[in-house]
Image (cartoon, rainbow, N blue to C red):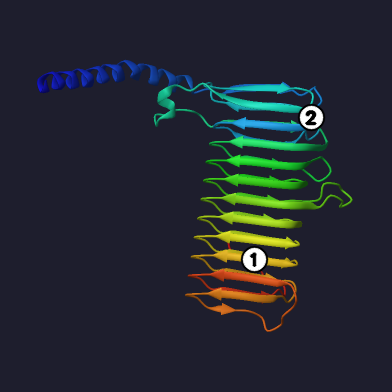
Amino acid sequence: MKKTLCILAVLLVIAGGVLMLATFPTIHAEQQKNDEYADFSEDLKDRFDSVEVHAVIADVIITSTDGGNPSVVAKTDPAITVRVESNGTTLVIEEIDQRKWYQKIGIDFTKPSKIEIHLANGTYTTLNVLNINGDITVKADLETIAFENIFTENTNGDTEIKIPVNFVSCNSKNGDISFILGPISPDGRGTTALVKGMTTNGDIVDSSFASHKSFVTGNGKITSTGSFAILYAKTTNGDIFFNRIYGDKVTAESVNGDITAAIMQPMNYVTSSKNGRVTVPKETGESPFVASTVNGDITIEIAAGIELLDD
């Protein structure tokens, strides 16, 4: 019995070697084929209120037309195709992965891909973007396009939101998140109601004026500036920096990081650090500033033209 099993094991090893030798020319040919990009372009003629994007490896950019026609333009690896559909309400852009099995388990000759979505001027209802291994960028000038709601999910890429929006929620596993937000309309109406960012292994940078802000990261730092009603920031292994902030309530929590803040008005400081120093202003106000860390310092100052943002 043991002799039979040994013979079978040897045969399996030989068969595996033959399979790899047979596959190698295919892998080499695939690498040569990927020397060129595949270009994709389609005009957007149908009407739609929302945009939905599903990407696998491509960087996704949503922006205005900049004087051109509404369109989807992509430059991808030949193993990637792009599908565009509109049902009269929602525009759906999908990146279809046609890579070989060996390209998905470590022997990957796939070229970087990019999908750009150029939208006509106006305010859209919802943007949903799901990306696995690419960056997400949503950017536009104030008087071009805006969204009422933005939702993004990212696994191994960064996310940047630089656009007027009312409600935005961005989640990431291994990427940074950046918010630079303005009002929905040029006259200042439609100020952002909620900014929410959550990432496991990345930094969060916020520059917005919103009613509610919520930022959570596991292994990264949080930087925020601007006004708000409620600001909540939590990180496990990172620092928290608040630069010239103004609001009704602040909560900052860290385990292994410092909490540093330059505030625009005195607040009611409730602070605790187990293994660090705590420094707060003598001036106090009614609005609560709650800060806690285990292995870090807490430093709160009244802003007077100082900049506390980390580089």
Quadrant of the frame with the N terminus: top left
Residue at (52%, 55%) from the top-left corner? 218
Query: What SS does tag 2 mark?
Result: loop
Disc ID at residue 149: none
Q: Is residue 77 above or below residue 210?
A: above
Front in this rendered view, residue 141 or 300? 300
Labelled pair 2, 1 in contact (Cβ < 8 Å): no
Q: Which residue is denoted by mark 2 in the rendering?
A: 68
**Where is residue 309 drawn, in percent x and y?**
62, 64
Badge 1 element: strand
Q: Which residue is mark 1?
A: 251
The x, y position of residue 243, in whole percent, is: 67, 66
Which image quarter is the C terminus in?
bottom right
Q: Is residue 115 visible?
A: no
Hey, what amino acid is under mark 2? Gly
- Residue 233 position by quadrant: bottom right
**Callout 2 environment at 10 Å: few (<14), some (14 to 19), or many (20+)?**
few
